[in-house]
Image (tube, grey):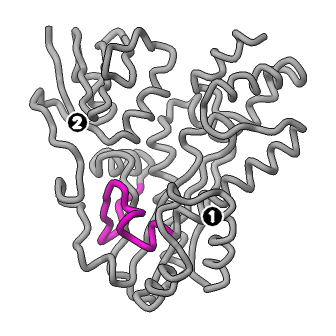
């Protein structure tokens, strides 16, 4: 039986799990998910290895890798592709871009790009700017205010749920949505800072660079000069960390706003508690209202029916 094997970023695997939510089957030991389509059985493992096996595995694999080779791909790392940033970028003036809300059933996707000069790097470190995943939401909210006070140039984009669901119905993957949001946020920021010297642009990598390029090319856009990709970039780049904090703070604000609008506290993430909240909303408000508050293609929509 033909098969293709790749090693993909965990963010890509999470996006795949949501994409194939209607085709999920029993999960083997050590795997994150298994899905069956007319072309292949896709099994993604916690190690990052993804196996495409069936009558036409390359058809499914190309959706995520844009490769036809059956040779196993090396894991994406800070030194595994031509778009890896030079070490000098982290201490020079550069743009960093990151997103929030992609794995949450409720709430929008927020993307923020921030421009940090070499002079501002030590200041941001001093006030505690770092990987937002290691910060509480309360700390993130305070840090985002401090970043704004320092007049750090940034561009923030919010993809609200209604538009998200419309794009998803049109066949856009979440990966393409994120790519376009990053691209437009960076474009907006470059226009804001105009003549400022930018040594490079670093995107927290959620897909392989060639997949990102393919996504934006499908909308007649091109990659900006000196753009780099790196997994866990917020741990190395203060600009990405700043973008991450701004994006997360915006997501938290949007969740609070949506909770107030619907009159029910909306849970973050995609857990069992989220399923129960969905069920309550359906009972109290009707299922149609979810279009304004949720990413409807997530498996949680179906799981919530068990609580009705």
Q: Disc 2 or 1, which lies upstream in sequence?
A: 2
Task: State which quadrant residue 50 falls in.
Answer: top left
Q: Which residue is the site of mark 1? A: 140
Residue 73 lies, in percent from the top left, at 15, 38
- The answer to whether mark 2 and mark 1 are in CB contact below 8 A is no
Q: Nearer the viewer, mark 2 or mark 1?
A: 1
Name the residue that disc number 2 marks: 7
In the displayed structure, would residue 119 be above or below residue 167? below
| Secondary element at image label 1 | helix
Q: Residue at x 55, y 57 (%)?
A: 111
Q: In the drawing, does residue 7 fall left or right of residue 151?
A: left
Q: Residue furthest left?
A: 71
Alpha-carbon neighbours of circle 2 within 10 Å: few (<14), some, or many (≥20)?
some
Q: In which quarter of the image is the N terminus?
A: top left
Q: Tell me if I can see residue 101 in this picture.
A: yes
Please tell me which residue is depicted at 51% across the width and 67% down the height of the picture: 113
- Residue 273 percent location from the top left of the image: 69, 27
User: Which portion, as a residue range, is magenta?
Assistant: 221-241
* Residue 82 left/right relative to 233: left
| Tag 2 secondary structure | strand
Q: Is residue 193 above or below residue 217?
A: below
Is residue 239 a member of the stretch shown in magenta?
Answer: yes
Magenta-drawn stretch contains 56: no
Q: Which residue is drawn at 31% across and 22% down?
A: 30
Task: Identify the residue at the far bottom of this view.
Answer: 119
């Amino acid at each position: 039986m033909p098969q293709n094997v790749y090693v993909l970023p965990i963010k890509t695997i999470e996006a795949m799990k949501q994409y194939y939510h209607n085709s999920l089957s029993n999960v083997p030991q050590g795997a994150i998910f298994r899905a069956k389509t007319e072309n292949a059985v896709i099994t993604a493992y916690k190690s990052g290895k993804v196996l495409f096996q069936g009558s036409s595995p390359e058809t499914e694999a190309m959706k995520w890798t844009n490769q036809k080779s059956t040779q196993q791909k090396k894991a994406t790392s800070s030194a595994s592709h031509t778009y890896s940033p030079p070490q000098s970028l982290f201490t020079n003036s550069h743009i960093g871009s990151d997103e929030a809300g992609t794995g949450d059933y409720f709430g929008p996707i927020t993307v923020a790009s921030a421009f940090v000069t070499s002079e501002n790097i030590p200041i941001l470190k001093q006030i505690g700017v770092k990987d937002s995943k290691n910060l509480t939401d309360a700390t993130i909210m305070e840090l985002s205010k401090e970043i704004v006070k320092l007049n750090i140039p940034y561009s923030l984009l919010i993809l609200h749920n209604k538009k998200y669901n419309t794009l998803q119905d049109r066949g856009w993957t979440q990966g393409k949505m994120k790519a376009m949001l990053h691209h437009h946020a960076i474009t907006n920021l470059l226009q804001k800072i105009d003549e400022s010297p930018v040594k490079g642009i670093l995107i927290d990598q959620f897909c392989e660079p060639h997949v990102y390029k393919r996504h934006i090319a499908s909308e007649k856009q091109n990659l900006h000069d000196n753009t780099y990709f790196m997994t866990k970039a917020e741990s190395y780049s203060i600009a990405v960390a700043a973008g991450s904090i701004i994006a997360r703070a915006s997501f938290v604000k949007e969740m609070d706003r949506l909770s107030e609008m619907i009159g029910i506290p909306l849970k973050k993430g995609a857990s069992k508690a989220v399923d129960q909240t969905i069920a309550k909303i359906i009972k109290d408000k009707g299922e149609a209202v979810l279009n304004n508050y949720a990413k409807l293609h997530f498996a949680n929509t179906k799981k919530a029916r068990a609580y009705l």
